Amino acid sequence: MKKTHEYFENYLKFLEKHSLYPTIYTVDGVSSSPEVMVKGKKYLSFSSNNYLGIAGNEEIKKATIEGIEQFGVGSGSTRLLSGTLDIQLKLEQALSRFTERDDAITFSSGYLANVGVIRMLVDPFPYFTLYNEEPGVIISDELNHASIIDGCRLAKSERVRYAHNDVAHLEKILKEYKNKRKLILTDGVFSMDGDLAPLKEIAELAKQYDAIVMVDDAHGMGVLGPKGRGTAHHLGVGKDIDVIMGSFTKAFGSIGGFVVTDQKVADYLRITTRSYIFSDPIIPGVVAGLLKAVEIIENGEDLRQKVLQNAVQLRSGLEEMGFTVLGKETSIIPLFIGSEKKAMKFSTALFEKGILAPCIRRPAVAEGKERIRFSVMATHTKEQIDTLLSICRDLGKAVKII
Ligand SMILES: Cc1ncc(COP(=O)(O)O)c(C=O)c1O
């Protein structure tokens, strides 16, 4: 065996030994609905980010199939090389109208949007030199998503973390770096904590200290705010955030990502962002389905009400039983456990009782911050949530966390 293979094997053995190798279930059929099948057994799923329950929507499926019939299954090349399709522009126009911003740029994933855009907002222009500018500083919430962290790693600018949602700490850092170009990065809704960033305060600080703000709203877009326009609009600062990123893998029930911003910033990003220039776009058939999804979301007040009502039922039910539940207002309900052993035990027992919900532990959260991450959809029924609550009550007592 090659030495390198031995290296991988040893790591795999280590992960197995410490129960760190994640279990990935093979789901038969659909994985984004409240009831899913695993090895022929029915499970109630509280693990999908298909918040509005539209991943299997008939109108979206029809639009996607028609799009595939019209355009085929590939884009052919990147948009800069083989040209942009009218339908790609239509989706970007729909997104800018939806979010009330000048322009939108789509990417084949939200991860790629973050990985590409972040450095372009703060690093010196990578291709020509006009100003001899120095690298800037990225000031990032300590609990930001992995794709933000990876986007920061690609940047030449310095990176500084501020304590989660701590605006006083953020201001202290902004003061320290007052003579540098500054980019503040935060999730709108934190994916593992289910809480919201204080975007109003962050936008005010950004104005005061002349910093750019970018918000990753993968989990807020479509769910929060008037017409589902996202966390920034929900908090009344939809136009004060310089760049808002969204993902189509959550409320939109599909695949892809985007940023919305002002015209000049969009013009700049479109010709500089490497994950846009050097990677093919979302395939046109899926774009056709996404156009329909935007329309459904804009008119989806009933879906938003239902998912948030489901979230309240689950959150308040767990709290009344004495569990520690993190976050608020969102469709992510993390049941905090704070011990890897107990969290694993709880999660395995949930699975045995027919519930799918991920146990969140290293590397997604720090040791000692383990939790079960429940996410609800508009398509869950009150009875399904009651079932989960009653199972949690029994398990909470068995594992001695209530
Ligand atoms: C907060 C956050 N940002 C970005 C992403 C990446 O989005 P995508 O799935 O579109 O790559 C995710 C997905 O898990 C996320 O939770």
Image (spheres, rainbow, N blue to C red):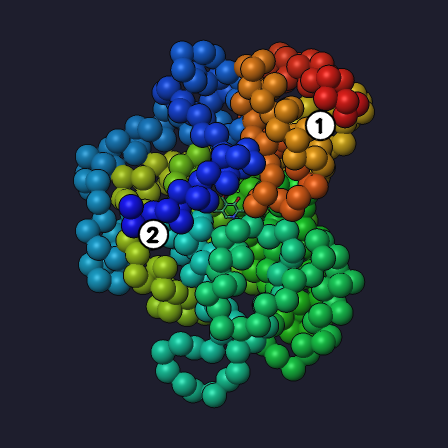
Tell me if mark 2 has few (under 14), some (14-19) or many (20+) residues whose alpha carbon lies within 10 angstroms of its own: few
Q: For the point 40% across and 49% down, which residue is it?
A: 7
In the rendered image, which quarter is residue 309 located in?
Answer: top right
Residue bearing the label numbered 2: 3
7 shown above or below 174: above
Residue 75 percent across, percent down from the top left: 23, 49
Q: Would you place residue 225 above or below residue 47 in this image?
A: below
Image coordinates of residue 230 in percent, x first then y, are 58, 45
In the picture, the quarter occupied by the C terminus is: top right
Closest to the observer, 350 or 134? 350
Q: Amino acid at mark 1?
A: Arg
Task: Identify the residue at horizontal 44%, vertical 49% (top origin).
Answer: 110
Judge the density around disc 1: few (<14), some (14-19), many (≥20) Cα neighbours within 10 Å: many
Q: Position of residue 391 (x, y in %)?
A: 66, 14
Q: Position of residue 138 (x, y in %)?
A: 59, 68
Q: Nearer the viewer, residue 341 or 211?
A: 341
Determine the secondary structure under disc 1: helix
Q: Which numbered mark, 2 or 1, is in the foreground of this view?
A: 2
Residue on which disc 1 sits: 315
Q: Which mark is residue 298?
A: none
Residue type, numbered disc 2: Lys
**Residue depicted at x 23% and y 36%:** 68
Q: Secondary structure at mark 2?
A: helix
Q: Is residue 170 left or right of residue 192?
A: right
